[in-house]
Image: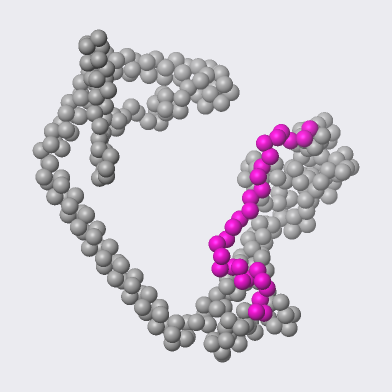
Amino acid sequence: MDLEPEDAFISLSTLEAYIEKHPEDAEKWLDFLPTAFKLAMTPRQTIYARSSRDPPAAELLEPHINIITPNTETPIEHYLDGCLVCKKTWASTDGVPTTTLICGHTYHTVCYMYQYYENDATRCIVNNCDIDTWDYIRTIYRNKRSRKNRAENLLLNSFKRRADFKQDITHLKGYISEFNKAQGRIEGLIKNARRDLIHKHIFSINHLQGDMNTTVKDLQETQEMLNYKLSIQKFRKHAATIFRKYHTSFRELHVNGIIKCSWRARGVLERHRALGFYKLGCRIYPGRKLITDPLANEVDSDSDLAED
């Protein structure tokens, strides 16, 4: 969005000079800016084109796939003869869309975008070409954004020298300062309340944590934990041999559907993470919802079966 004055004889610098000289008339000068500026104070909405879920049309996809696919013709070596990405001549690819960069060198559009998608490479690959198109694009965008910001700040900059604006801002800063002080005090009270709560129930908390530690120790000594560790050792021993023999990896086999495994199991098997006992933890938050007994339903079911 270009925020240039509607009147060709009035530049943005002229508006800034007038508003600096007569800040009390700043609102009147905004009439010389396009209607789009008047909506600049509203939240910015970005419109995204919804990608189609339908597969690409075959009649449009096939010729572009053939461009990327190498053939038996003699590859070109000079950018005037053809595209340096696919190494095909312009004559053999007549009718294929092309893209010319700011440096003047031309590529097939699909080749240039494929290179960017695959290698994240945006520079021209012609030898001794030191012009990066994206440097110019960034400069153009930043210049346009700078002009937009200047136009949007015209009104605010004019208010900075007004006495009523300074007084209102002083009051606003006072309210913010008052809020910061109140927030600091209430945060201190919450911190002290938490400390007092832990101090009051420290023996119960330590008892609960002690039971957790004992439970973890007992779990680590069970036969199930031993079988769990042995299964990991067996997998890693045989997997290392298979991966070296076939020059593949766990990820490649998983992506190609040869083996199926959950991401949690894969994280343990590939040493990304170890088995944790965090699920034994118990989080207690203030609120109306109290912690319920997870075994209550089972106890009630056992009682009903006993009565029957």
Q: How many marks?
A: 0
Residue at the image position 80 percent from the left and 48 percent from the top: 98
User: Where 60 falls versus 11 (above or below)?
Assistant: above
Looking at the image, residue 25 sits to the left or right of residue 228; the answer is: right
Quadrant of residue 88 within the rendered picture: top right
Residue at the image position 67 percent from the left and 36 percent from the top: 53
What's the magenta region?
31-58
Report x, y in % for residue 77: 79, 43
Residue at the image position 87 percent from the left and 43 percent from the top: 95
Compare residues 301 and 222 and report the one nearer the observer.
301
Q: Could you tell me if residue 301 is visible in this image? A: yes
Looking at the image, residue 35 sits to the left or right of residue 27; the answer is: right
- Mainly helix, strand or loop, the magenta region? loop
Quadrant of residue 247 within the rendered picture: top right
Compare residues 245 and 200 and report the one nearer the observer.
200
Looking at the image, residue 97 sits to the left or right of residue 30; the answer is: right
Let me know if residue 38 is in the magenta part. Answer: yes
Let me know if residue 99 is in the magenta part. Answer: no
Q: Could you tell me if residue 89 is visible in this image? A: no
Report x, y in % for residue 281: 26, 33
Report x, y in % for residue 63: 81, 36
Quadrant of residue 173 within the rendered picture: bottom left
Farthest-out residue, top: 308
